[in-house]
Image: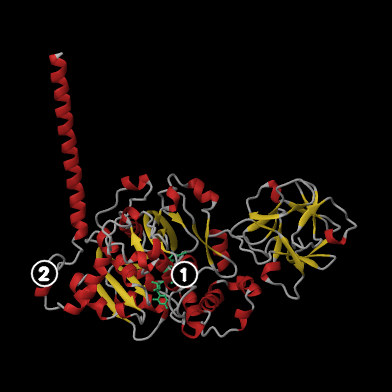
Amino acid sequence: MALLRRRNRFVVFGGLFLCFWMVWGLLQMFELQRDSIQKNRAADFGKDLRASPHYDAHYEKLLEEDERRFVPGLGDRGVSVELQGEEAREASRVMKKEAFNLILSQKIPYNRTLNDVRHSDCKSIEYPEDLPTVSVIIIFTDERWSTLIRTVHSVLNMSPSRYLKEVILVDDFSAHDELKGKLDYYIETRFPKIVKLFRLPKRSGLIRARLKGAEEATSDVLLFLDAHCEVTTDWLRPLLARIKEDESNVVVPIIDVIDDKTFQYQNNGGTFDFEVGGFTWNGHFNWIDVPDEVAKARKSLSEPTKTPTMAGGLFAISRNYFWKVGSYDKEMDIWGGENLEMSFRIWQCGGSMETIPCSRVGHIFRNFHPYKFPGEKDTHGINTARFVRVWWDDYQRLFFQTRPELAKVDIGDISERLALKKKLKCKPFSWYLKNVYKKFIPDEDVIGWGRVRTQEDVCLDNLQKDEESTQDLGLFPCNAELSRSQYFSMSKDGELRREFTCASVKSTSVPSVVEMVKCNGSPDQKWNLSQDGLLVHVSTDLCLDGHREADNLARVNHCHPSRDSQIWSLEHVDNP
Ligand code: LR7
Ligand code: MN
């Protein structure tokens, strides 16, 4: 009994000792890491600012007012915060103007913590000590103080000082008062040396703002961020390591959503699967699944994964390579298109673009732009037309077919960009479509394309529905010209489809609506166009019927070759 007790005591003490020792060890490690990271914090932090030659009571008072709003610990670990009562009502009013929850943002401390959201495999990857240095470039126009400053704090807090040489802020001619003297003062007193602020003398747009940042940068790598981001554990090294391996790797972190209303850091619902960047034929960026063959070849979801395009706001690129490969098209104005331009250029001119899943950065996605567009021009459309004309060769037809208005607009001179393409001996777009992104080409290698018309002059029509989710296939009187909503293709695999979605029949009851679902090659997405014009759904043997009812939906029905509503013709038929 006594022996047992003594042994117990020994085990308890021994265990306790072991525990203490391990905890101490961990703390030491943590401290070390903290130490190397926190050196970035301004030397003046914690010191009496009044002794500083920069001290200014007016600005200190404003800064104190900001800090008085903070609720310590609020939003820590990226949890969702719901405001209550009158404050919640005010917040939703303000949100209509700011496009995010400014009231909540002002209550969340600049240094809030976030969870380590990486795939566990990331934690055992070893990176070289000797990584390139980096200039983080944050551009802004009329962004809000709290989100901008939180972005800066986050970068400084989470980046090892041996790699982070400078944070470059470029103000694209903001009008907000809080971004004027107060911002200069804050930087001067809190982050002297490491944070540098440049101001553009007139509104120049995000493309030229980034160019300014790149010109001022002095490090090996340029890393661009939007002004409403927060970075997470060890975000920097995976990006730098990949550029060190090959300077023509342009790398993008996983971009997580920081909820615009609750500031929750949404780590993709806890799944580690991620999407990469694609594009639509009408010139927009979109998210697409990693192609099957790429996904299958991956050993872990932590591996760098090639991406056909990037969203544009968050990426790292060797400074040398940035200039070598043509920086940006400086004629692009304000917002939009530069991300796809750079993506095609990088790939076609010999570089590559990857998503680096071990690097994760949060971004506040806003539903509208809280800043002005001078002249209210469609800068996205014009910028897109510029790069389409430069990089898409013959495929620009697919863009202009559905954006005819942009074929007539003055998009400025593109000769410099064409000369660049020649100088760098860039590959044609057909190469990109074969080797980088095997995207469906609606009018190439298909049975037919264009308007799909019945004998009653009714056409298949997507009724301008959002195609991100499953929708019923529609019908409408055929338009005089081919428009985007009536553009369908019949692929050689028997798909009756649009760019991403395929006609499919789920139910065998008759008549049954036809759904447009993401193309997946399954048997319920196969159709056969018979000699006499019947569109037969192969797995059910039912026929597509264009008889228009009040709901404007297409249906399948028993086949009646004598019904005009079941006899279809394709506008363009490719001869085999
Ligand atoms: O005239 C301007 N001058 C600027 O300095 C217009 C904008 N800006 C600044 C702005 O303050 C912000 O910091 O540029 C940055 C980007 O503007 P946002 O945040 O309004 O753009 P966005 O997040 O809606 O749009 C995405 O696409 C843009 C296309 O031009 C840019 O490439 C953005 O950087 C890009 N953002 C991202 O990729 C984040 C992930 C979003 C997705 C998908
Ligand atoms: Mn943004």
**Amino acid type, residue under disc 1 in the picture:** Asn
Residue 202 placement (x, y as % from top left):
37, 86
- Secondary structure beneath label 1: helix
Vertical relation: 86 (above or below) 420? above
Q: Residue at x 64, y 57 (%)?
A: 501
| Residue furthest out toward the right | 562
**Amino acid type, residue under disc 2 in the picture:** Asp
Q: Quadrant of the C terminus?
A: bottom right
Crowd around label 1: few <14 · some 14–19 · many ≥20 (10 Å):
many
In this figure, which residue is indicated by the disc labeled 2?
Answer: 48
Residue 494 placement (x, y as % from top left):
72, 54
Q: Which residue is drawn at 79% across and 51% down?
A: 511
Of callouts 2 and 1, the N-terminal one: 2
The one nearer the camera, 254 or 506, is 506
| Residue furthest out toward the front | 86
Residue 280 placement (x, y as % from top left):
57, 65
Residue 550 placement (x, y as % from top left):
77, 63
Q: Which quarter of the rendered image does ligand 1 occupy? A: bottom left
Q: Residue at x 45, y 80 (%)?
A: 372
Real-space Cα distance between discs 2 and 1?
44 Å
Q: Is mark 1 within 8 Å of ligand 1?
A: yes
The one nearer the camera, 378 or 133, is 378
Asked whether, in this view, residue 135 is left or right of residue 489, the answer is left
Vertical relation: 369 (above or below) 73? below
